[in-house]
Amino acid sequence: MKRWGTRILLIGVFFWLLHTMRLKQRETLQAGPGPGPGPGAVELPDRTFTFRLDPAAFRAEFPQLQSYRCRELIPGDGVCTGPPGPPLLLLAVKSHPASSARRATARRTWARPGVLGGYQVRAVFLVGVSPDPRHMALLGRESGLYGDVVLWDFAESHHNLSLKERCFLRWVGARCGQADFIFKGDDDEFVNPPALVAYLHQTPDAAHVIHGNIQRHAVVFRGGKYRVSSALFPQDTYPDFPAGGGFLMPRASVPALAAASERIPVFPLDDVYLGFLALAAGLRYRHDDRFRVYGVKDELCLYGEAFMVHGVSLDRAEEVWRGLYMERRCNGMGPLPS
């Protein structure tokens, strides 16, 4: 019996040592496996991990993201002009030249300019270049009619969305520094400016944090649309970031994010890239589930409670806006912009 007891003890010690070794291996991988970062590498610690970005790896795999210098074909210099007025809430909407119907729906509904709850609300559509001349011609006509388009000379693509993040920070600093808050979103969603304005009034520290649906140390995908190679980023989790479908940032965050964008390699996923910039800038987050970046049960009054809902069809966006703010089919809905 004594020998069996000794064997069981030894087996227990063996598995404890194995478990300890695996934990240490995982910690080493999170800290950055393999050889140390090359010259010029950026190290960004949060409370859990230290993230390392090697500019040489980014230049090797995504050279166009690193070398691009923001150049505007349509500068959008009239978006934030005019006499002083109420605090400005700017709706900055990522769009595609081919998405003219989506922009038209937004302008009729949630992106309509006006004054709302003591805030001036304006929209700007952030666009890259399409190879289709018809789309570009239509975009030029829209810009002439509404003056709410910024067009850069990079091609529209999934990875180039990160360039919209970087170039927008430059644009807003140069041409719309008076924006008190900026909502960043997409054109394929329903946005609820009355709810956003009410939230700003109700949140005492709103001007000191970035607000959104915060993804905490999300897992790195090695395949599919959101694939990132281990050569580019060997760690298996990301820093915290606001999901890109919609988030709200205060004016005070823009200079720090823009400065970080000058030294952080451009990451090929736009929401993760913003997370790296925010970490480098030392900015804080506030999570709120009402940034419904993953959809919501399709009931009218639930849209009224949300700040935004991602992936909403054009017809449904119009129906929701009409039901909430024209037909008033839910109680407690705020006023429309005047």
Image (cartoon, helix red, strand yellow):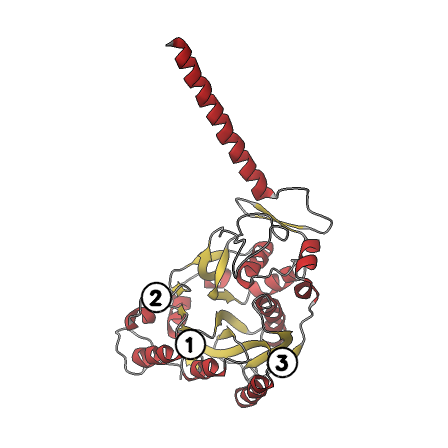
Quadrant holding the C terminus: bottom left
What amino acid type should be assigned to the residue bearing mark 3? Pro
The residue at 54%/82% (across/down) is: 148
* Pointer 1 or 2: first along the chain: 1
Front residue of this view, candidates 208 and 294: 294
Quadrant holding the N terminus: top left
Along the horizontal axis of the image, is 70 left or right of 194?
right
> From the viewer's perspective, is residue 85 above or below residue 235?
below
The circle drawn on residue 18 is none
Front residue of this view, candidates 121 and 187: 187
- The residue indicated by pointer 2 is 296
Inspect this view and state whether residue 77 appears. yes
- Distance from disc 3 to disc 2, alpha carbons, whole Å, reads 35 Å
Residue 246: x %, y % from top left? 46, 67
The residue at 42%/84% (across/down) is: 108
- Distance from disc 3 to disc 1, alpha carbons, whole Å, reads 28 Å
- The residue indicated by pointer 3 is 75
* Pointer 3 or 1: first along the chain: 3
- Distance from disc 1 to disc 2, alpha carbons, whole Å, reads 28 Å
Q: Secondary structure at mark 3?
A: loop
